[in-house]
Amino acid sequence: MDTRKLILKLNARRKQLLAGLRLPTGGLPGSLAESRGRCGSAGCHCQEEGGHLSWTLTFMVDRKKRVEHIPRELVDAVRRRVGQGNTYKSDVAELMAINAQLLILERRARKQEDLFKRKAGR
């Protein structure tokens, strides 16, 4: 793809990202995971049915991993908030990558223009 066309395409995507980028006030980091465990009671259904269902939210704080139990009644809300946080993080990461690409492409384009001007001036 032509450098100018790529720059235009990246600028359009950057504009689109910036227009829709909103910090989710309730967004959560990390991931929500389902697990199953057995309680140890000999007569409990979990011994035959694959265990008790449990949910945890795993995230980092001050470079330390945290794992918090999530009550069943909050799972849907936490899942939605984790999704909001992950969408925001991926949009910001894409925006930063576009900025880096544009920096390189615009620098190359300036070098090509300078070279063309020098050749034309001979």
Image: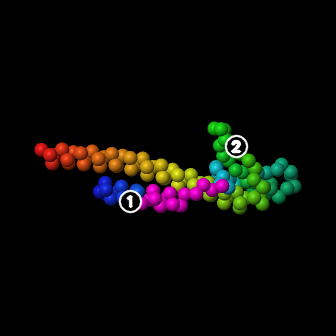
Regarding residue 87, the answer to whether it shows in the image is no
Mark 2 or 1, closer to the camera: 1
Image quarter (top left, top right, bottom left or bottom right) of the N terminus: bottom left
- Residue occupying image coordinates x 49% and y 58%: 17
Is 15 displayed left or right of 61 in the figure?
A: left
Is 59 rendered above or below residue 50? above
10 Å crowding of disc 2: few (<14), some (14-19), many (20+): few
10 Å crowding of disc 1: few (<14), some (14-19), many (20+): few
Q: Give the residue type at disc 2.
A: Arg
> Residue 72's x, y, as percent?
77, 58
Q: Foreground residue, 67 or 51?
A: 67
Q: Residue furthest top?
A: 63
Q: Foreground residue, 109 or 76?
A: 109
- The region drawn magenta spans 12-25
Is 24 rendered above or below residue 107? below
Which of marks 1 and 2 precedes in the sequence?
1
